[in-house]
Amino acid sequence: MRHAKASRLALPLRRRQMQVTASQDQQRQAQPASDERSKEVLDAFFLGKAVAEVVSERVGSAVGEILSEVGRRQAEQQQQIKQFQEEVKERAREALERAAKDAKK
């Protein structure tokens, strides 16, 4: 009788051991999938970071070129304004000289 009772207790214990072993096997099988998923997330992070860096550099370069072009055109415009002012002053001076000559005659 004692042997029968022990075998009845041993049966649930074996089932639990088998369940634990099966659970461990499932975890081991899930582990590579989890590792692969983590690798994919990490790869995506670094890919996104690299994209952001390249875009930032290119945008910075483009903004620098635009500002350089704006500065160049502004300098050209100021030079043209200065030339215009000088031409106007020269013509006014010449007209004044002609008027003074005509007044003396």
Image (cartoon, helix red, strand yellow):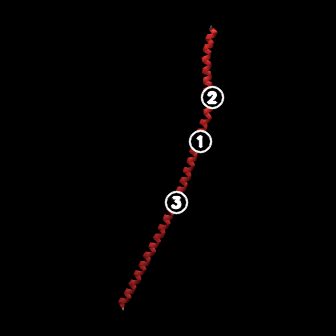
Callout 3 secondary element: helix
- Where is residue 3? Give x, y as percent: 64, 10
The residue at 60%/14% (across/down) is 9
The residue at 39%/84% (across/down) is 95
Amino acid type of the residue tagged 3 in the rendering = Gly
Left or right: 96 with respect to 5?
left
Q: Earlier in the sequence, mark 2 or mark 3?
A: 2
Q: From the viewer's perspective, is residue 84 above or below residue 26? A: below
Q: Which residue is mark 2?
A: 25
Give the Cα distance between marks 2 and 3: 59 Å
Q: Which residue is mark 1?
A: 40
- Report crowding for label 2: few under 14, some 14 to 19, many 20 or more residues within 10 A (C-alpha): few
Amino acid type of the residue tagged 1 in the rendering = Glu
Callout 2 secondary element: helix
Q: From the viewer's perspective, is residue 64 above or below residue 8? A: below
Q: Residue 34's quadrant in the figure? A: top right
Q: Which residue is mark 3?
A: 64
Q: Which of the labelled discs sits on residue 8, or is there none? A: none
Nearer the observer, 18 or 95 = 18
Give the Cα distance between marks 2 and 1: 23 Å
Residue with the most extreme left position: 103
Mark 2 or mark 3, whichever is nearer to me:
2
Left or right: 28 with respect to 66?
right
Screen quadrant of the N terminus: top right
Left or right: 63 with respect to 29?
left
Q: From the viewer's perspective, is residue 13 above or below residue 64? A: above
Screen quadrant of the C terminus: bottom left
